[in-house]
Image (cartoon, helix red, strand yellow):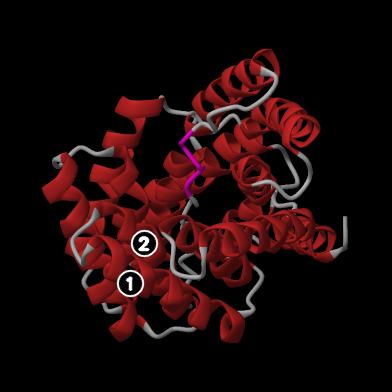
Amino acid sequence: MKALKASFCIAVTALALSLSSGASSRAAEDEAGTLTQQMKELYRAGKYTEALPLAQKALALREKEFGPDDANVAMSLNDLGTIHYNLGQYAVAELLYKRSLAIREKTLGPDHAEVATLLNNLGDLYRAEERYAEAEPILKRSIAIREKTLGPEDPSIVMAMSNLAATYSNQRRYIEAEPLFRRGLAILEKAHGPDDPEATVLMSNLADAYIHLHRYADAERLLKRSIVVTEKAFGPDHPDVAQAMNNLGALYARQGRNAEAEKLFKQSVATFEKTLGPNHPDLADVLENLAAFYKDRGRNTDAEQFFKRSIAIRKAASRPI
């Protein structure tokens, strides 16, 4: 049977969690801080469309209060960029990340932990756009800053470590990706316990590496665990649940467990559509897998339908916004 493409889980970049202290207009900053807190809660639940206008308003308030190049504004730029990233609006996200990074480097210096956060987010954006030659050095720089300032076992290092591993996986460099995913997962489990919802992205990504290394039992265990942990934390409609279902479906398809695979692919499509909408770039991978699944079984009409839809989504995502 033709091997299916096992899609990679997009490693979700972290929002800036610290609220700015405020300056002259305390009321304006209190409002921005409240909006930011509400936005973070929506973001964590995968409700990116609902989070977007809150992040936009918080940024506008901070720009009015502090000016366009103030350090307080950089956090809101990063938050807004991260939401656009998760909505598949990569061109907008890149501009916001670069502006935030420039402010952070100017006000905090090139080796500050918050600079590392921006480098991670920008590097993962380049990974998502398949700009791997740009992504790799940026992510390595982010890791190096974290190791220097916080130590090699600090949980904050895991995001860039996972994204660098995902960059390797996207290039089929699974031997290099696997130990990075394992190290990141071990750090999070040590820091937060075995049921940390932040670790589910690594579970899915490590499972994907295991699939390509033909360690199917290890992959299945991780994907099932990822689904359980994410559903417990965020409910069944979170994008990470959809991604883990897609990857588990790809695994079952490789193993000839066809009924289970088809069911999971369909559940993944339905969850992505419900949460992110019908035209999100993450959905294209699942549609492509479902199309390949149908093609392998001679269901050419069904396959063509999903291939065409996947191609249309990818073309739309590549256009400047």
Is 136 in the magenta? no
Magenta stretch, main secondary structure class: loop
Q: Is residue 129 above or below residue 27?
A: below
Quadrant where the N terminus lies?
bottom left
Q: Position of residue 48 (x, y in %)?
A: 63, 34
Q: Position of residue 46 (x, y in %)?
A: 53, 33
Are the residues tagged 1 and 2 within 8 Å (C-beta)? yes
Q: Position of residue 299 (x, y in %)?
A: 63, 60
Residue kind at label 1, given as amino acid type: Ala
Furthest toward the top, the residue is 27
Foreground residue, 194 or 212? Answer: 194
Q: Is residue 313 visible?
A: yes
Mark 2 lies on a secondary structure that is helix
Q: Which residue is mark 1?
A: 209
Q: Residue at the spot x=58%, y=64% of the render?
A: 105
Q: Position of residue 297 (x, y in %)?
A: 54, 64
Specify whether 225 is left or right of 165: left
Q: Which residue is mark 2?
A: 205
Q: Alpha carbon of mark 1 to alpha carbon of mark 2: how far? A: 6 Å
Residue kind at label 2, given as amino acid type: Asn
Is 17 in the magenta? yes
Foreground residue, 37 or 113? Answer: 113
Q: Which contiguous range is marked in magenta?
A: 14-18
